[in-house]
Amino acid sequence: MKPFFKTVLLTGLFVGVTDIMAAHIHVWIQSGNFPTKVFQYIAGGALGLESSMKGGVGIALLGLLFHFFIATWWTLVFFVALPKLKFLQFNKYVVGFFYGYFVGACMTFIVLPLSALPDNPFVFSRAIVGWSILGAVLGIPIAISAYRYYDVKPNASAVA
């Protein structure tokens, strides 16, 4: 059998890269400016936004570490859940896409409210866009990797 933690780690690193690239591109498209303080913002989840945004390279590296930890955590969650929850063994693209929605909802309604970041109002249309991006750049690659790791053959009866 393939090494579990190596597969999870490499998948987590991959989706961490695709997620942060998508975040940068999304912010750049919306604002016209390249976001230079994304990792400091992420570190603000632990340090508070005011102090993290004043920080330098060390704070940005901490944010980078947090970002990849979170991406790898969500990868591990899916890898652990896939063999236990048969309804996930349906279609890796559909399941992966909606796993991005699940991750987005958990981050929005559980993780971020518990962090030191200021509250942001929930905007449904913005959430749908963000969660769809997560589905594409995080959920689908995680599902593809996990299906390959477990050699899952899609099972139409898994949803029954």
Image (cartoon, rainbow, N blue to C red):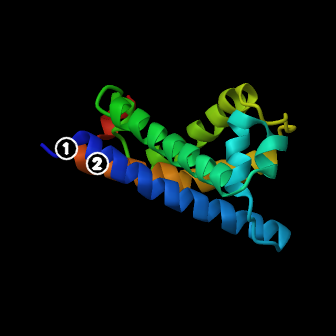
Q: Crowding at label 1, few (<14), some or many (≥20) Cα neighbours within 10 Å?
A: few
Q: Amino acid at mark 2?
A: Thr
| Lateral position of residue 8 relative to residue 106, left or right | left
| Residue lying at 56% horizontally and 57% vertically, measured from the top left | 19
Is residue 17 at least partly visible in the picture? yes
Quick one: which residue is furthest to the bottom in this view?
32
| Residue 49 picture location, percent across and down | 81, 41
For label 1, the residue is: 3
For label 2, the residue is: 7
| Residue 108 picture location, percent across and down | 70, 35
| Residue lying at 53% horizontally and 41% vertically, measured from the top left | 70
Q: Quadrant of the N terminus?
A: top left
Contact? badges 1 and 2 (CB < 8 Å): yes
| Residue lying at 42% horizontally and 33% vertically, measured from the top left | 77
- Comparing 128 with 6, the one in front is 6
- Numbered mark located on residue 100 in the image: none
| Residue lying at 43% horizontally and 58% vertically, measured from the top left | 14
| Residue 84 picture location, percent across and down | 31, 26
